[in-house]
Amino acid sequence: MNNKELFEKSLKYVPGGVHSPVRSFKGLHTTPRFINRGKGAKIWDEENKEYIDFCMSFGPLIHGHQDPEIKEAIIKALENGWTFGACEKYSLELAEYIINKICFIDQIRFVNSGTEAVMTAVRLARGITGRSKIIKFNGCYHGHLDAMLIKAGSGLAGTAEASSKGVTEKQAGDTLICELGNLEEVEKCFMDHKDQIAAIFIEPLPANNGLLVQTNDFLKGLRDLCHKHNSLLVFDEVISGFRIGFGGMACKTGIHPDLVTYGKIIGGGMPVGAVAGPKKYMEYLAPLGPVYQAGTLSGNPVAMAAGLVNLKKLTPTAYEKLEKFSHSLSLIMKEWMEKNGFEDYQMIRYGSLFWPISTHQKLSNITELPKNMNERFYQLFEIMLNKGVYLAPNAYEVGFVSLSHDEKIQSELKERLWT
Ligand SMILES: Cc1ncc(COP(=O)(O)O)c(C=O)c1O
């Protein structure tokens, strides 16, 4: 069956034909590709068409598809069984490896996804502070938990409403929305909801509505406000955690949160998330503390083994290489766009994340984004797809570069784009 036939069949059995909405290619006027296999920087669909992959499963595959060492670790772990629901050594090794390298965390709890990590962090922050409200920023995504499916309300700053049906008004009322970059608004929220705010949650490198890079002054300002109001600062580093250097934005900027959430890279492509922080906070979690959290498959040995090798391979040299590859690739794409009818586009890049966007304005806030971005993006996406280049399938999604996007792939990209 070709991609179209497979998608039509999928529509019969699966809501919208997909198991996660962005896979549906909504607004892109073409059929989702059914991916059959991946190797290095490439994927092949069920029609055996080859693509250079810049979606890379939305981030976890920092070493590319089927990295041989990660594959070997997975197979080795599998041979001993793939879940025990009991203590095992892989999760201990991964915990120890991460904690020894990241100075502001003493303990970590592994879960199965980024959403689960954030959900745990929300409950933990509330349990630690005894407060119910949290602040989140317009344009940051933290997974599909009720507390985070909230958008800015039409009223005053800080008001909010659910961005999904099924989230109750009560839940929406406990999440206060502020604009990225606006410290005054955050301060006002603290004044308006005195002693009620458990935590500020932020993607320190917002990468879910394009790439809205924030200043260190803003992040530092949030740190200071949390200290001042006895609230916790939570960095959601599910994307940025091990992509922007080891330890993500917290280690890069030296601005340390009270709790941090990880996902994606931490599991090497297997389903993993984590919440981490100082012992004094982490010990609020069950079984020691009063904040309940659990998971049948949490700390799954196969995922832990994959994550450990994934992280061990992330040496300083690896990050230098990744930066070099990302720089070259984004230049190749930018130059091609400029000369082929996409001169309205700029390429925003931060490390190995890039975002082609049809405006030349500097963007740091979701309110500055052009309207209906997919109406323009689908043209770029389709041309790229036909040339064998697979971008993340939505104008709001960033592209991911891996260590397998080497010089050879860079020349191949150039050739594909220009012929
Ligand atoms: C910053 C951030 N937090 C949380 C999540 C949710 O992670 P998951 O999709 O693994 O549930 C994502 C997913 O993209 C994310 O980017």
Image (cartoon, helix red, strand yellow):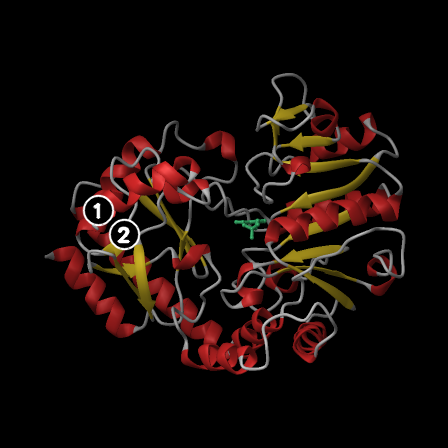
Q: Is residue 26 above or below residue 319?
A: above
The picture places residue 89, in percent across and down from the top left corner, at 69, 80
Q: Which disc, if any, is residue 213? A: none
- In space, the residues marked 1 and 2 are separated at their CA atoms by 6 Å
Which class describes the residues within 10 Å of circle 1: few (<14), some (14-19), or many (20+)? few
Secondary structure state at the residue bearing disc 2: helix
The reply to whether callout 1 and callout 2 are in contact (CB within 8 Å) is: yes
Q: Residue at x 85, y 46 (%)?
A: 127
Secondary structure state at the residue bearing disc 1: helix
53 sits to left or right of 281: left
In this view of the protein, which residue sits in the foreground, 392 or 184? 392
283 sits to left or right of 74: right
Q: Residue at x 42, y 42 (%)?
A: 22
Q: How many marks?
A: 2
Q: Residue furthest top?
A: 155
Q: Is residue 77 above or below residue 298?
A: below
In this view of the protein, which residue sits in the foreground, 162 or 414? 162
Amino acid on which the number 1 mark rests in the picture? Glu
Amino acid on which the number 2 mark rests in the picture? Lys
Q: Is residue 257 visible?
A: no
Q: Which disc, if any, is residue 334? A: 2
Splitting the image into 4 quarters, where does residue 305 fall? bottom right
179 sits to left or right of 120: left
The picture places residue 232, in percent across and down from the top left corner, at 79, 48
The picture places residue 185, in percent across and down from the top left corner, at 69, 30
Where, quadrant-wise, is the C terminus in this rendering?
bottom left
The picture places residue 153, in percent across and down from the top left corner, at 62, 21
Splitting the image into 4 quarters, where does residue 156 fall? top right
* Residue linked to disc 1: 338
Q: Is residue 320 above or below residue 296?
A: below
Q: Is residue 335 visible?
A: yes
